[in-house]
Image (cartoon, rainbow, N blue to C red):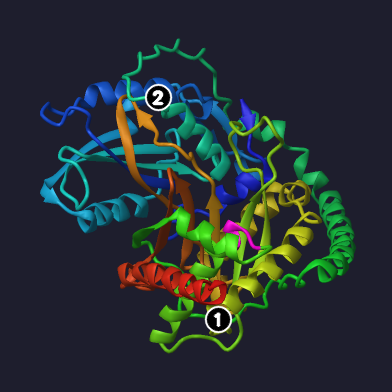
Amino acid sequence: MKQLTTLDAGFYYLESHRTPMHVGGIYLFENPEPDKRFDYQGFKNYIGSRLLKFPVFRQRLVEVPLDLGLPYWFDDPDFVLDFHITHVALPHPADTAELLRLAARFFSRPLDRQRALWEVMVVEGLKMPDMPDGAYAVVTKVHHAAIDGKSGVAIMELLFNTHADKEVILHLPAPKAERIPTSVELLLRHSGEAFTTPFKLAQLVTKSIDSFFKTNTRQIVASAQGKTPPAPFSAPRTLFNVPVTPNRIVSGVELELERIKYIKNNVPGTTVNDVILTICAGALRKYLLEKNDLPKKSLIAMAPVSVRVEGKEAALGNHISAMLVSLATDIDNELDRLKTINKSTIGSKVHQKAVKAEKLMDYIPSQLEAMAARFYTRMKIGELHKPIFNLVITNVPGPSKHMYMNGSRMLRNLAVAPLVDGLGLIITVFSYAGTVSIGLTSCKEIMPDIRHFAELFLESLSNLEQEVKMVSE
């Protein structure tokens, strides 16, 4: 039995039919034996034996009545692997667009809260350019209450390896039966919470004031080292800063890591992350210009930052802070935009050390957190105030070498992340074996032409690359 942290619970409480709160991915694999029928049973046994090493994949969440306490993870006495792994064969030949449409429907559906909060779908029948015959896809989703980017990489490392040999299936012993407490027992366990809530609210105010003064001190330091980070609620409104719908749409594009490193190496002081943010900013600027919706003020992105303790990368749950970065979309020149973003990230990195999301949220009473999150989602409060920021851009470093899953080489991957009201676009960046995949998640009603938006990232990279070459030569 393990209780959710306040940060993990926040993702759980924010969920509605319009805002399913799972993270996921689309992984394309080479079939090492394309002439043979795909061994779905062998695949299921392999995945099940690996994933079940993490207890959370055989557990479900149990809520405390009246939200007097945060939900608990309990071993699911009715756990059945077949409810979590499914097999789909698309009409052959199915191209990339067909796979992405299927994946979008998969991601649009919230996970069943009466079961362990994850699903895997295997997809056959694919025929794509530069893809070998027999290639198949694995589409995954796991509730954000259980996982963040760093722990996702740890799971990948468990499932994958660096050699093409088939693995021996691990047969794990069945977990010990765990009795789930009744609602009355949980209510009695947390009955004291109702009386401590006022004191927790007082602590929250005290901690917030303390964090405010620490932040101001950090901003003075940040101003000396770089550009002072943008403040929350200072972002301009755009076409994707609206309430979201239940209809997800996904797309993506691959960039060559060497091209990104070339730019970084020829613009002193910048990082790979700075270059990626600049490419994102260029695509956003071009897209909004085409829609006649580019604000005069720069867009602001929130970039999650891992605060995991070294050696705890495999621990599940969320261990993150965040920094706000100006994307300099008000600047036309690509190179000038890169230098401005670099100053913004320097200031934001200093600033975010003062604010640890987990520590501050520990003082929020469970009833208040649940009520606020659900009220915000159901009443579409996001459209009544200025955006806290315009979008989220995640950047998680992945394996630098080709990885294999039970003998199948992973060819491509695309990460998918959840949306909330007011944030109708999220960009997920994941590096793998010399490539950087840019995953895009939005709603059909907000960005119906998301595939065109994906193409603008290639254009943005080329424009920035050309600017750097002109200066370097």
Residue positioned 47% across, 50% down in the render: 430
Q: Which residue is labeled 1 in the image?
A: 237
**Span colored in magenta:** 270-274
Pick whichever of labels 2 and 1 is earlier in the sequence: 2
Give whichever of 451, 68 is nearer the camera.
451
Specify whether 369 is left or right of 198. Answer: left
Residue 445 in percent (x, y) is at: 34, 72
Residue 96 in percent (x, y) is at: 23, 55
Q: Which residue is labeled 2 in the image?
A: 79
Can residue 377 be seen in this snapshot?
yes
Specify whether 339 is left or right of 209. Answer: left
Name the secondary structure under disc 2. Answer: loop
In which quadrant of the rendered image does the N terminus lie? top right
The three-letter amino acid code for the residue at tag 2 is Phe
Specify whether 365 is left or right of 386. Answer: right
Residue positioned 70% across, 44% down in the render: 307
Name the secondary structure under disc 1. Answer: loop
The quadrant holding residue 50 is top left
Badge 2: residue crowd in 10 Å (few <14, some 14–19, many ≥20): some
Can residue 418 be seen in this snapshot?
no
- Magenta-span inclusion, residue 76: no
Give whichever of 253, 81 is nearer the camera.
253
Give whichever of 59, 393 is nearer the camera.
393
Q: Which mark is residue 324?
A: none
Residue positioned 67% across, 66% down in the render: 324
The three-letter amino acid code for the residue at tag 1 is Arg
